[in-house]
Amino acid sequence: MNINKSGQRKIMAPSTVISEENLASAAAFLLMLVATLIKVPFYPVPFTLQTIVLPLLCFFLPRKPILKGLALFALYRTMQRGFGITLTIGYIAGFFLMAYILTAKTWERSFFKVLVKILTTQLIVLITGTCVLALSIGVTKAFVCGFLFFLPAEILKAVIIMGIYKLFPLRFKNSRMER
């Protein structure tokens, strides 16, 4: 509440300016959503581009907007499925771990170290997804269909991500948002 010079209260309209952080969060949410829409149907979970989009977001955006965008994405996906445990909820949980690890301040510029970090986080996503998937379809089937089946694709995605990383080596340098 503001008071003007004559002592009267002045009601101010809420600001319509969107902060850079909220804009980045919305962009993270929308890009993850688009990555979900581009899919190849497989059983029991589809092949999507989310594990390409998320590391790329982590190259260019700070942690907080990415995690906020992921929270919106997770809420949207659970609302879409009726707030129950779905076959993909473990993979979505793994996305949070991936984003947290990839946005750490200890990023290395070494090509090999970045590749190892990306492959490690992709394995984390596969492991968390497979663990939840095992609750529904059994351990053996989940391991084969939810982990082994996707492993070659994740390695290919890591190569694609590293190609893009090589094209844009200066990450975070132009961002005015704090990490």
Image: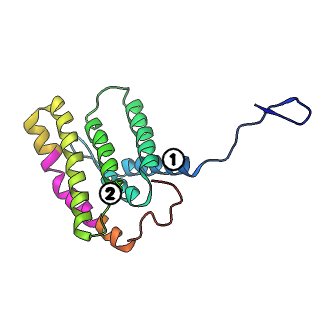
Residue 44 visible at all: no
In the picture of the structure, the residue carrying the numbered disc 1 is 26
Marks 1 and 2 in Cβ contact (< 8 Å): no
Magenta-span inclusion, residue 24: no
Q: Position of residue 58 (x, y in %)?
A: 38, 56
**Quarter-wise, where is residue 97 in the image?**
top left
Judged from this view, the residue extending furthest toward the right is: 6
In the picture of the structure, the residue carrying the numbered disc 2 is 52
Q: Amino acid at mark 2?
A: Ile
Mark 1 neighbour density, 10 Å: few (under 14) some (14–19) many (20 or more) = some
Towards the viewer: 147 or 112: 112
Magenta-span inclusion, residue 159: yes
Q: Is residue 7 left or right of 179 when viewed as pictured?
A: right
Q: Amino acid at mark 1?
A: Ala
Q: Is residue 62 above or below residue 75?
A: below
Q: Is residue 78 above or below residue 172?
A: above
Q: Write down the region rendered in magenta.
A: 147-160
In terms of secondary structure, what is the magenta stretch mainly?
helix
The residue lying at 88 percent from left, 29 percent from top is: 8
Q: Helix or strand or loop: what does disc 2 sit on?
A: helix
Q: Earlier in the sequence, mark 1 or mark 2?
A: 1
Q: Position of residue 6 (x, y in %)?
A: 92, 33
**Quarter-wise, where is residue 167 in the image?**
bottom left
Q: Is residue 128 left or right of 140 when viewed as pictured?
A: right
Towards the viewer: 177 or 118: 177
